[in-house]
Amino acid sequence: MDAEEKKKSNAELIAKYDLLFDDKTPLSKGTSTFIAFFAIGLIPLIIYVVDFIQPLNINLFLISTILTGIGFIVVGYLKSYINETSLTRGIIGTLLLGVLAALVAYYVGDLLERLITG
């Protein structure tokens, strides 16, 4: 790759990812990330809030799990769309990572409960 091709390649990267004209401050990026994590974190709780307001005769854990899976699918889709990568790979990767994190959290919580209650 000669110098001219390298300049063109760098210019394309800068244009594609808007590297020179990023007008977002760290505070605005952090705030938007916090809001996104907070909103996604509420998804599994929605069914429990509904059940509190209007008691339901259904498996709340199953519904919560399904809603969480849908949330991970949406996050994977958005991540792939924004990064212009494979939608299938992004969705499956995010979903698997979410499942793995949920399993670890469940078993750590179970272990801690057994340690605390004896």
Image: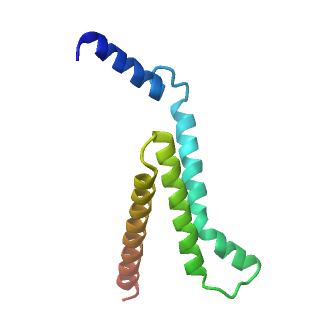
Q: Position of residue 94 (x, y in %)?
A: 43, 57
Picture quadrant of residue 11: top left
Number of numbered discs: 0
* Quarter containing the N terminus: top left
Q: Residue furthest right?
A: 54
* Quarter containing the C terminus: bottom left
The residue lying at 57 percent from left, 50 percent from top is 36
Picture quadrant of residue 17: top left
Q: Residue furthest left?
A: 1
44 vs 38: above or below: below
33 vs 48: above or below: above
The residue lying at 71 percent from left, 78 percent from top is 52
Q: Position of residue 54 (x, y in %)?
A: 76, 80
The residue lying at 40 percent from left, 54 percent from top is 89
Q: Is residue 66 left or right of residue 91?
A: right
19 vs 84: above or below: above
The residue lying at 52 percent from left, 41 percent from top is 30
Q: Is residue 92 left or right of residue 71?
A: left
Q: Nearer the viewer, residue 49 or 63?
A: 63
Q: Nearer the viewer, residue 118 or 57?
A: 57
**Applied colour scheme:** rainbow
Q: Nearer the viewer, residue 55 or 14?
A: 14
Q: Position of residue 80 (x, y in %)?
A: 47, 47
Q: Is residue 81 left or right of residue 114?
A: right
53 vs 99: above or below: below
